[in-house]
Amino acid sequence: MDALADLLDGPRARGAFLLRATLSPPWSVRIRDEAPLCLVAMLRDQAWITPDGDRAVRVGPGDVAVVRGPGHYTVADDPATPPQVVIHPGQVCTTPDGRGLSAEMDLGTRGWGNDPDGSAVMLVGAYQARGAVTGRLLAALPTLLVLPGDSWDGSLVTLLGREIGRDEPGQEVVLDRLLDLLLIAVLRAWFSRPDGRAPGWYRAHGDPVVGQALRMLHAEPARPWTVAELAGRAGVSRAALAQRFGRLVGEPPMAYLTGLRLALAADLLRETDATLEAVARQVGYGTAFALSTAFKREHGMSPQRYRESLRRPAG
């Protein structure tokens, strides 16, 4: 398993927020839902996305934007259009002065907007929950990236557009998986661009030595790896692997492995009811105490407190 696949294979979309937005200008939507990640696929017309404190970026027909939360941002027909709608946590929709708009903006099954025949049409998919493995990926992304429509195969957008308005048994699961596939496709295309600013671990995947070491670590994170064993399997000296790994990835092999293990542990705490002892064994720590010590150093809280904070009801 490679690093990107591993990071995307853990916390998958579950009950993601998806809709088709149809709008007539002038329109402007202030996004304050603090979702960890949101995809916007422009089907028709254009939009401008303005993250707080940053410049506005145009999203044209066929383009896909990925916005990293939890920061706030505005999506509008023009950067100068003042917000008319505010989206709060829990996808609560109001005017800027707090009047509810949910019923007024409802356009049927996963349809939303101010005009069913509006000139601007976009698909919106927001990941609601943040898991630690996804957090490692989010840390590698800019606040906003826009993938031009002519730089990749956008057939998944077409498929999602067909499925998003259907109301059939199991449709939520279908849409969750399509959103995952779209995210993976967009990030692969983005990271492959010369100006994509791919993270070190992604670029290093193509290196014959470091890439092999990364695949070994992700395939067996619980194995008691040493730099010497990784180097031997990769066919280089210990010093050569350590130097090459640090230069390409940005941190030593064992530091990378520690981060991977703790991210996987956090994901297991969020996604399962496994005991701390079981989680420790699955990610390569000999005891629950050892995992708890490392986890608290990384996350600033104990594993138990971390699990409770994620499961605490909102509001």
Image: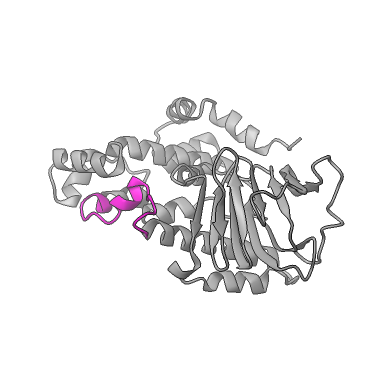
User: In the image, what residue occupies the spot 25% across and 39% down?
Assistant: 246
* Image-quadrant location for residue 243: top left
Q: Is residue 301 left or right of residue 167?
A: left
* Image-quadrant location for residue 119: bottom right
User: In the image, what residue occupies the spot 60% across and 35% down?
Assistant: 307
Q: Is residue 36 visible?
A: no
User: In the image, what residue occupies the spot 30% across and 54% down?
Assistant: 205
The image shows residue 208 at horizontal and vertical percentages of: 21, 56
The front one of 106 and 252 is 106
Count of numbered circles in the view: 0
Q: Quadrant of the C terminus?
A: top right
The image shows residue 39 at horizontal and vertical percentages of: 58, 56
Q: How is the image coloured?
A: one colour
Q: Is residue 57 magenta?
A: no
**Range of residues picked out in magenta:** 193-212
The image shows residue 202 at horizontal and vertical percentages of: 35, 51
Q: Is residue 55 left or right of residue 203?
A: right
In the rendered image, the vertical position of residue 283 relative to residue 169, given as above or below: above
The front one of 244 and 233 is 244
Dominant secondary structure, magenta = loop
Q: Is residue 215 left or right of residue 308?
A: left
